[in-house]
Image (tube, coloured by chain):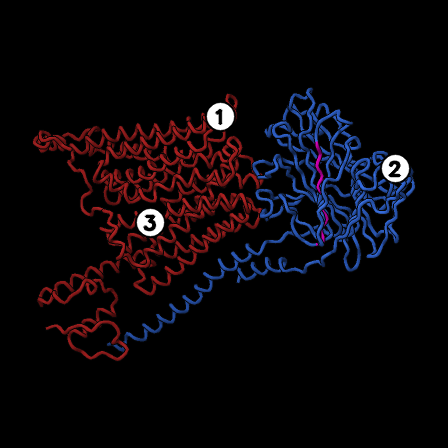
Amino acid sequence: MLWLTLVAILIIPALSQQDPVREIHWASNPGCPDNFTRWDCNETQILHVMAKGPNDTINYLWAFYSKPALLMAVTEPEARLQIDWNQLGNSSKRLIRFDPQPTYSFGLVLDRIIEFYDPLDKADMTQANSSIVWDCRKFSWTVKDVTSGVENLRVELLGNNYGNGSKIGNVSVVLSAFGRDGYGPLLPHMQHSNNASQVEITLKNLETSEDFKSESRFGLQLMVVDSVPGEGMDEVFHRRSLDDEHTPGVFDINTLQTPEVRKGEAGGYMEWRPVAYTSPVRAIEESTSAVHYPLRNVSQAHLKGTLLHDFYGHNLAHVLVPQSLNISFGIAEDGFYDATKYNAWTFTMAYGQPPKDKFSLLVIMILAVGLGLPTVIFVFGGTYMCVKKCRTRRDEPLVN
Amino acid sequence: MEDPEEVVTNPRRRQDEEDDVSCCSPAHLCSRALALLLMCILGFGSYFCYDNPAALQDYFKHDLQLTTTEFVYLYSWYSWPNVVLCFVGGFLIDRVFGIRLGTVIYAFLVVVGQLVFALGGYLGKFWLMVVGRFIFGIGGESLAVAQNNYAVLWFKGKELNMVFGLQLSFARVGSTVNFNVMEPLYGWVSHYYHGYTCLGVVLFIAATTTLLSLISALILTVLDKRRERHIGQNSVGGTEEVVRLSDVRYFPVTFWLVAGICVSYYLAIFPFIALGKVFFMRKFEMDPKDANFVNSLVFIISAVASPLLGLLVDKVGRNAFWVLVSVVSTLGCHALLAFTFLNPYIAMVGMGVSYSMLASALWPMVALVIPDHQLGTAYGIAQAVQNLGLALVTMLAGVIVDKGGYLLLEMFFLGWLCVALLISILILIIDSNGDGLLNMSASQREAWETQRSEQADLEREKLLASGAMADVSPQDQLQRSDFHIRNRFLSRIGAPLPEHCQRGRRYQALR
């Protein structure tokens, strides 16, 4: 029957095999020597998070010196991290190494925040007449909170004191590492696999330029690179999903994927929904668009001094293909940034294949019961009716 | 209401009128056509303004900072007063106000309600808007009852069906015009005003249609006074539809099942249209004007298809079957909207046709199972329960959108349609267990009716002749199947019956 096949199509993906759970361990400033001068070893500027699985470990290196950098490296389960602390940021050699070498790595740097003037209310960063750059190097980044569990970790990072107080504004970055499939805790409840981390960037109370007369919007420039030589990322891929249970009213997902992922193998990818929230409450009424722009190849000079440069060394210049991804926040008639002075955007950064959409159990149950019950009654009722009619027909001649 | 002098002069005036049938005479076609037009316009304003929130949903939410949960209060508070008024409204018209004054009062309430609603928008006070919708609700539904009453007064017999159909089509046209006009209107007004002030001004402009309804109510009053003076009839002759709640005990199961469909089916249509615009904008990426147009497809199609399908169902019969078909096809349309990205025009056209089909097949079923003198109560109950369902479920729908998204909302509507499906299957089963009346074809029904009246006459003659009326119960008179009639006759003449036919009553032998 039709409804049986429909239910089967929906149930099978939902009950599909679950990936094994990873254990999360973490260390702050691992191996930081006592004579290290750049910052106090008690002040977390490098976080090493290990998501240990049976066959491999996903290592996240989150570094906040210079520009915030997020590195994801897939290694053997017992790989060790070595950091050449004293030369950090000052050499073009590979200062951060895993032993044995990672099979794959994917890195991201929060390069700059861009304020662009949008008098025509187009919400298109490429058409902006003028813009002002906030270089992420000029924020001072401090870890405010680390909450850890066996299967997850949450780090709250705050960037403020831009240019030693020359501009007012906070950038909050919440980093999460997950060891289990699931959905993000806050809207947009991004779906993640057990090989995933999540990044939430919030631009709070950034001081807009007076020249822009409160008609300006903000955007981000991210730098991405992966360990596969010669190949850059695929262009951002937009797909529509039927299920908006987790992000009510939003049916789109954007994916930045490496060619490996496109070919069906395991590789790095980023996923996000094209929404940004304009209030901590995060209701759909308080959302605006997150618009992405085509990838561009960039020079490795932008990554100098960051963790990625210390990890990849001179490969960055010669073999690997760093690219920039630009995202802007806003949509026509939303009142610009100054309406709420709050933009929050979330993306997942993970390894493997992007998680498949599946309907929740509730949906399946409603369909099963809702269509099954009438069908059953129809069948039984119909047979009962026929039987009764046959019996009545038999009765009549007897009375005569 | 008539003064004594007029009564005295009445006969002479009537004679004058018979000799001189001018265009101004109430009996003449022109006058009745004018009255028909006015009756249609009477309902136009209220239907136009009913769906104003749906046509401007995204502006309501943006300008007044409303969540979907709050937005739907504009609909549920329209329905709340009508849970009670469905009983009381008709009674008020018949006994307290009279048709003319009643219609004017209700039209006035509609105007006041819409003005308060617009004022609330202009000032940015949401609570005032809800109050306005409440007042609007008190007037709106009762105005529809008044409209029907006017139709019954002015038109009779076969004409009446056509008039009802026309009134309904006009109402649907009102809804359609609303969906297609409000968006451009808001765009124009937003050049001069902004935010919720713009919304308020737009709603004030929409209120002019209600003024139109009030004016036609006033003109109808004048025309009806003249008609009454000339024809001298102030109430519906024959069966008076009175609302008597004690009748409820005698309603058959099939009526409650039909009422169940009235509730569960319409719950999957009206709240969906209320929330449809933003759904189409977000899921199918339509711009506001197109989203409104798609939303209005159900009403546009219903305006045209309702009379046609009504004719079809009248000719062909088999109402219960058509109800089942409508429910299944609406299920299919909602499933398309929920589980595919297929062009929503297809699903909405399907929904429009199914909705018209169901309306044409379902409401006559009430008249089939309920005797004439209880029809008033029956329709009142069906409407009251429907409004109760709408009030509650619309609020729930808003919460679902906010918390669970549009897929879950569609699942919610699919759930209600599955309930309607279950009930319509039950109706088919129970009805075919009984006399099969609800699913007979038109010719079968005619034959059945003549047979029943013949049987009843025959029975009455026999029993009157033998003088044994005392032991005949009302139930005997209503026994319908051949089997039972033959059984009763045989037992009365004392013939021995086979074992398995001993079920049921043993009758006293006739002397």
Chain in blue in the render: A
Q: Residue at x 39, y 69 (%)?
A: A384
Judging by the rendered image, the residue that carries numbered circle 1 is B198
Residue A208 horizontal side relative to residue A69, left or right: left
Label 2 Cα crowd, 10 Å radius (few <14 / some 14-19 / many 20+): few
Magenta region: A170-179
* In contact (CB < 8 Å): disc 3 and disc 2: no
Q: Is residue A340 at all visible to an observer of this figure?
A: yes
Judging by the rendered image, the residue that carries numbered circle 3 is B382
Q: Nearer the viewer, residue A377 or A79?
A: A79
Judging by the rendered image, the residue that carries numbered circle 2 is A37
Q: Residue at x 43, y 67 (%)?
A: A380
Label 1 Cα crowd, 10 Å radius (few <14 / some 14-19 / many 20+): many
| SS majority, magenta | strand
**Is the residue at mark 3 from the same chain as the one at mark 1?**
yes
Q: Amino acid at mark 1?
A: Cys
Q: Position of residue B263 (x, y in %)?
A: 39, 50
The quadrant holding residue B106 is top left
